[in-house]
Image: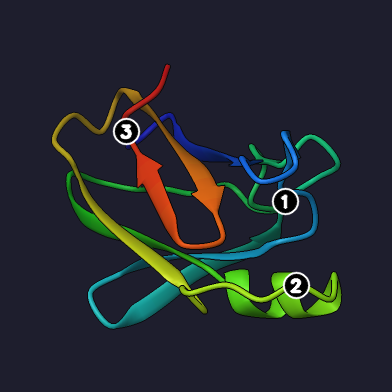
Amino acid sequence: MSKGISTHVLDLESGTPGAGIAVTLGQGDSPIAQAITDTDGRVADWGEALQLGAGDYWLRFDTGSWRAAAGKSGFHPQIVIHFTVPDPTAHYHVPVLLSPFGYSTYRGS
């Protein structure tokens, strides 16, 4: 089983962590877990012991609600990142660099 999946959001517009963003982890059509990014913009603990095997997963970031709550607008109301877990004994970190009109992601450490 996977050692886990974590994420981190950095708001490039302000240069600060993306704190308070709702994030959903899922596989196929089903959500598996939900969390809110902490004050450092991170989700490291999904509130339950995830037992993930090898396979395809996704993370959905509710950026539209987060921006609206801050009185800001943006182009992407949500970001969905699909990724593959080939080795269920490894840890997978999926960072997101977010701006009002774009984002980037990569496999972090």
Label placed on residue 37: 1
Q: Nearer the viewer, mark 3 or mark 2?
A: 2
Mark 2 Cα shell of 10 Å, populated few (<14), some (14-19), many (≥20): few
Q: Position of residue 27 (x, y in %)?
A: 29, 67
Q: Look at the numbered disc 2 and give the secondary structure of its residue.
A: loop
- Alpha carbon separation for disc pair 3 and 2: 25 Å
For mark 1, give the secondary structure: loop
Q: Are marks 3 and 2 in contact (CB under 8 Å)?
A: no
| Residue 109 in picture, x, y percent from top left | 42, 16
What kind of residue is marked 3? Tyr
Q: Is residue 88 above or below residue 23?
A: above
Dot 1, how many residues are within 10 Å of its Cα: few (below 14), some (14-19), or many (20+)?
many
Q: 16 or 90: which is nearer to us?
A: 16
Dot 3, how many residues are within 10 Å of its Cα: few (below 14), some (14-19), or many (20+)?
few
Image vertical order of residue 92 relative to residue 61, above or below:
above
Q: Amino acid at mark 1?
A: Thr
Which residue is disc 2 drawn over? 72
Which quadrant of the view contains residue 69? bottom right
Q: CA distance from mark 3 to mark 1?
A: 18 Å
At label 2, the amino acid type is: Lys
Q: Is residue 84 above or below residue 44?
A: below
Which residue was labeled with disc 3?
A: 106
Estimate the x, y position of residue 85 in percent, counting from the top left: 21, 40
- N-terminal-most mark, 3 or 2: 2
Closer to the chain start, of discs 1 and 2, is: 1
